[in-house]
Image (tube, grey):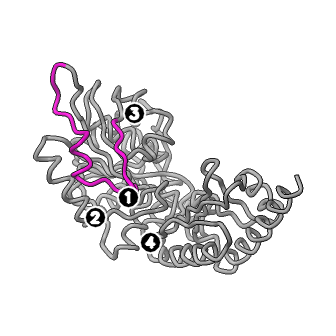
């Protein structure tokens, strides 16, 4: 199967498996796992923050960060299609006791002019804005990369208003590869950042939350409350270290493959492709074409791909998918679209 459902489906590389086998471990809840400690130290260094915390998932990372930055009963501003809002089981409400105040954007990219229209300073009738969340790259906007000036402007203005900023940087290394900027520069002004080791970087599991040392120290307690005290976790942290050091060098290949897919899609009748900047390709199907039928037809032809809703689909490139695989997947999609169209005309 050629799997374009997500970059979470990657298998550990031989180097990751070897590192996992040889990992030195201890009890991480006691702070005694040397491999996990090395990962956290190196992750903090890479993103330019005082400290970092290894967590099982990106959702847990975002949950911890928002809890650290807010108080119960506040609001959190984010884009209306943010992962935080649509794909994390309302953890912001369930764990942090906050309400999301979503803002509409045309391309997933918040600007200060948009943020200030929904920012609240408190009063007798309105809950205060406790934090602003930005997603870089933006998943449902097709892997869009935040312009650096937008990030810096939001952070500067928010901090003037006494509001912290969290970045959901699940694919921040894709943003770095696309923009040519180091991750540390991209996240320099945000208060906290989460990034995934298990997505584009290809580790089998794990994410990182980074920020001020005092906040990350509190974050360890929140991780324990959420069931993230994983004991001898060095076997996973070892793979994360390999992913952190080696995988960013290859992300440009994934981006090139995504552009190849977009070019092929652009030549298919009735298919509309959103702008492609990184490894996510979001596209609309021809009018009246049911995504469920396309997903099933692709699977019959050896290709796995997800529909996002009843309108559009998403293909995600990663290091387990070659250019040849991408070409075969597009051939399969063309065949599937013809078959679905023929079936609908005879139905």
> Looking at this view, is 338 or 206 the one in front?
338
Q: Nearer the viewer, mark 4 or mark 3?
A: 3
Q: Is mark 1 on a helix, strand or loop?
A: loop
Compare marks 1 and 4 and give the one earlier in the sequence.
1
- 186 in the magenta segment: no
> Which residue is drawn at the image coordinates 57% and 73% (left, top)?
262
* Main SS category, magenta section: loop
Residue farthest toward the top in the current orientation of the protein: 124
Residue 186's tag is 2
Are dots 4 and 3 in contact, CB under 8 Å? no
Residue for point 56% across, 60% down: 20
Identify the disc placed on residue 136.
1
Circle nearer the N terminus (2, 4): 2
Q: State how far apart marks 1 and 2 are (Cα).
A: 9 Å
- Disc nearest the viewer among 2 and 4: 2
Viewer-nearest of labels 1 and 2? 1
Cβ atoms under marks 1 and 2 closer than 8 Å: yes
Q: Which of marks 1 and 4 is in front?
A: 1
Image quadrant in which you'd find residue 65: top left
Give the residue pinned by disc 4.
248
**Marker count (numbered):** 4
Residue that mark 3 sits on: 92
The answer to whether the residue labelled 2 contacts the one labelled 4, judged by CB atoms less than 8 Å apart, is no
**Which segment did they paint magenta?**
101-124
Q: Which of marks 4 and 3 is nearer the N terminus?
A: 3
Q: Where is residue 11 in the image (x, y as percent from the top left)?
A: 63, 63
What distance separates the C-alpha of mark 1 from that of mark 4?
A: 16 Å
Which residue is painted at 61% across and 48% down in the image?
Answer: 309
């Amino acid at each position: 199967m050629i799997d374009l459902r997500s970059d979470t489906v990657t298998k550990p590389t031989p180097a990751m498996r070897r590192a996992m086998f040889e990992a030195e471990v201890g009890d991480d809840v006691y702070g005694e796992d040397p491999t996990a400690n090395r990962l956290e130290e190196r992750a903090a260094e890479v993103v330019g923050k005082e400290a970092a915390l290894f967590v099982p998932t990106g959702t847990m990372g975002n949950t911890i960060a928002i809890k650290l930055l807010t108080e119960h009963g506040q609001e959190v501003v984010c884009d209306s299609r943010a992962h935080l809002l649509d794909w994390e089981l309302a953890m912001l409400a369930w764990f942090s006791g906050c309400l999301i105040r979503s803002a509409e954007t045309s391309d997933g990219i918040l600007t200060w002019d948009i943020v200030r229209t929904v920012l609240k300073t408190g009063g007798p009738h309105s809950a205060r804005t406790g934090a602003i969340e930005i997603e870089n790259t933006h998943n449902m906007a097709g892997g869009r990369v935040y312009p650096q000036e937008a990030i810096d402007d939001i952070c500067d203005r928010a901090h003037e208003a006494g509001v912290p900023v969290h970045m959901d940087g699940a694919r921040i290394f894709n943003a770095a590869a696309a923009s040519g900027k180091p991750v540390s520069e991209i996240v320099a002004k945000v208060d906290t950042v989460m990034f995934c080791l298990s997505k584009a970087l290809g580790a089998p599991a794990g994410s990182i939350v980074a920020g001020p040392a005092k906040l990350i120290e509190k974050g360890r307690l929140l991780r324990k409350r959420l069931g993230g005290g994983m004991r001898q976790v060095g076997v996973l942290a070892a793979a994360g270290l390999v992913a952190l050091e080696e995988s960013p060098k290859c992300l440009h290949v994934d981006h090139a493959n995504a552009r190849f897919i977009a070019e092929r899609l652009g030549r298919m009748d009735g298919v509309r492709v959103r702008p492609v900047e990184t490894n996510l390709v979001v596209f609309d199907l021809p009018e009246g074409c049911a995504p469920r039928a396309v997903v099933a037809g692709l699977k019959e032809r050896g290709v796995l791909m997800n529909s996002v809703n009843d309108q559009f689909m998403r293909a995600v490139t990663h290091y387990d998918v070659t250019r040849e695989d991408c070409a075969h997947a597009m051939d399969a999609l063309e065949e599937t679209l013809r078959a679905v169209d023929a079936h609908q005309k005879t139905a």
